[in-house]
Each structure stands twice: as structure tokens, then as C-alpha cells.
Amino acid sequence: MLHEHQPGGLPVDLLLLIPAAAAAAAYWAGVLSPRSGVWPVYRSVAFTAGTAAVLVTAAGPLPAQAHGNFALMAVSHVLAGMLGPLLLVIARPVTLALRTMDPVPARRLVRVLRSIPARFLAHPVTAAVLSMGGMVLMFRTPLFDAMRTELPVHWLVTFHLAAAGYLWTAALIGRDPNPHRASLRLRAAVLVLTMAAHNVLAKSLYATPPAGIRTDQGEAGAMVLYYAGGAVELAVIFLLCLQWYRKPPGRRTMQRARSANRRNGPFNGKTAAAMESAPE
């Protein structure tokens, strides 16, 4: 069983509230900053809900209950690795950061975004391998038993699922500034292949549950992965198709963004607003 308490009785998983609260505070400080301009409410709601979706899979009663319930473990996977990252991507935290940061840290963030490691991690193929690879390792290796019995392993797996899910979602439909964005055709192809791989994994779990999981529990968990995960993937498909439909002809919007850079400098609210409307 997961070891959730310190000797004094304090739940260890409460420590996860510290980085979650810090992230939420930083985001909302940006939202309330005068530099953020008119920031849509739905993005703030999406960030809060996405953070909560990831946090609930690592802290609170769900991890302990999921220890003996494969269906709940599948729910945790969908929340941490799919739904939570989708909501965080919709919240556009990088755009908010560039709008509200001072010039020096904003330039540093842009240098990070333009770096070779960022290019590698932001590529749809890399993100898909990290996401699907984590799922396979989670369900088809001894890591499955380790994460059910050791809390640190559970946290590391949850972090990987959330981070890889965020990279995958951002690589496919992210609207934050991304100097390495792949073409829509490549993103669509990666989306189709990832969906196929996810469905194959769910069906294999239905036929052959992980060791120690009863057949009925394995079937229930596999159905959660297949249908709940499929619902999130349908949302990603919709958003990707919406980007494709809204893609403006020519490069007029990008030219407006470049003109704003020349007039106002590269790291102010006007430029960030122009970058938001740049074509995919």
C-alpha cells in the first residue's frame, strides 16, 4: 500500500500542494497584472482545473483507493496524462508569462524556447514517444507494482505522465509562442498514430490485465482508458481541425507581429497579442 504519512501523522502528499499553489499563484498574479491585458476567463479556469486534475491523482484519497482498483488507476492516468495537460495547454501559460515578465527574464525564456533541447522536446514525434512510452512502462513493466506500493515512484510516474502529456498536447495544438512548431500535416499524422497506439494498449489491457489485476478489474480499467481517453483525444482532434480551418491565407498576421516587434520591442503586451494571432 502507498505510504502516505510521516511518523508524526502529517500526510506527505500535502507537500505537493506547495508547488501546485506556487504555480497557481504565479499564473493568477500574471492574470491580475496590468500587463496581461484582456485575459480570457476560460484560460484562467482551464489552468486552475488542469492543475487540480493533475494534483488529485498524486495527493488525497484517489491514489490510495487506486492501489486496489485498476479502474481508478486508469482514471488517474486519464486525469494526469491527458485531461490535465489539455487544460493547461488551453490556459496558454507561456503567452501569459511573456506578456507580464520584465524584459530580461522574458529574453531568457525566449532563449530557452529557441534552444536545441526545447526544439527536440517540442517536436511532436518526441512528445508522442515520451507520452506513449510512459504509458507502456506504467502498465507493462515492474514499474506498475512499484508505483502502487511506493509513494515516491507514484509521484515520479505522475510527474512524467503530466509533463509528457503536456508536451504532446502542446506540440499538437498549443497556441503558445513556439519557434519550432511542426506543420499541421505532421501534427495530424502524429495524432492519428498516437491515438492508434493508445487504443491498442487499452485493448491489450482488456485482453491481458497487468499481473495481480483480476480480469474484471482489468476490463473495467481498459474501458476507462479506451473511452475516457478517447473523449480527450476527440477534443484534441476538434481543436487541431479548428486551427486548420481558421488558418489565415498568406502571412499577413505574421508580418503584423514582426512590425509590432520592430515598433514596440520584442517583449511587451502588444507583441504577445500579435504572436497569439500568428498563423499556425
Image: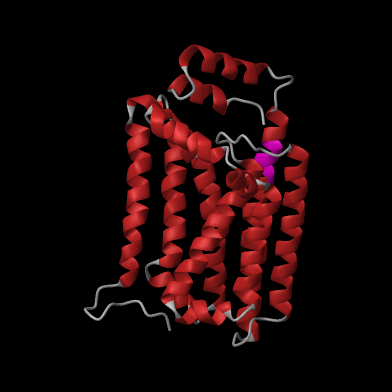
Q: Is residue 31 above or below residue 128?
A: above
Image location of residue 59, percent across then percent down: 39, 67
The residue nearer to you, when weighing 36 against 72, is 36
Residue 230 magenta-highlighted:
no
Count of all numbered marks drawn on residues in the image: 0
Q: Is residue 89 above or below residue 230?
A: above
Image location of residue 144, percent across then percent down: 57, 78
User: What range is drawn magenta here?
Assistant: 237-242
Q: Is residue 114 above or below residue 158?
A: above
Image quarter (top left, top right, bottom left or bottom right) of the N terminus? bottom left
Report the residue at 50% width, 65% height from top: 158
Report the residue at 42% width, 55% height from top: 52
Q: On the picture, is 113 further left or further right than 196?
A: left
Q: On the picture, is 211 further left or further right than 88?
A: right
Q: On the picture, is 249 further left or further right than 41?
A: right
Q: Is residue 212 above or below residue 82?
A: below
The residue nearer to you, when weighing 6 against 117, is 117
Report the residue at 73% width, 71% height from top: 203
| Predominant SS along the magenta part | helix
The residue nearer to you, when weighing 256 against 201, is 256
Q: How is the image coloured?
A: secondary structure
Image quarter (top left, top right, bottom left or bottom right) of the C terminus? top right
Image location of residue 145, percent across then percent down: 54, 82
Is residue 40 visible in the rendered image? The answer is no
Image quadrant where residue 183 sits: top right
Image quadrant where residue 13 sits: bottom left
Image location of residue 222, percent across then percent down: 65, 72
Report the residue at 72% width, 50% height from top: 191
Is residue 7 visible in the rendered image? The answer is yes
Which residue appears farthest toward the top when viewing the image? 263
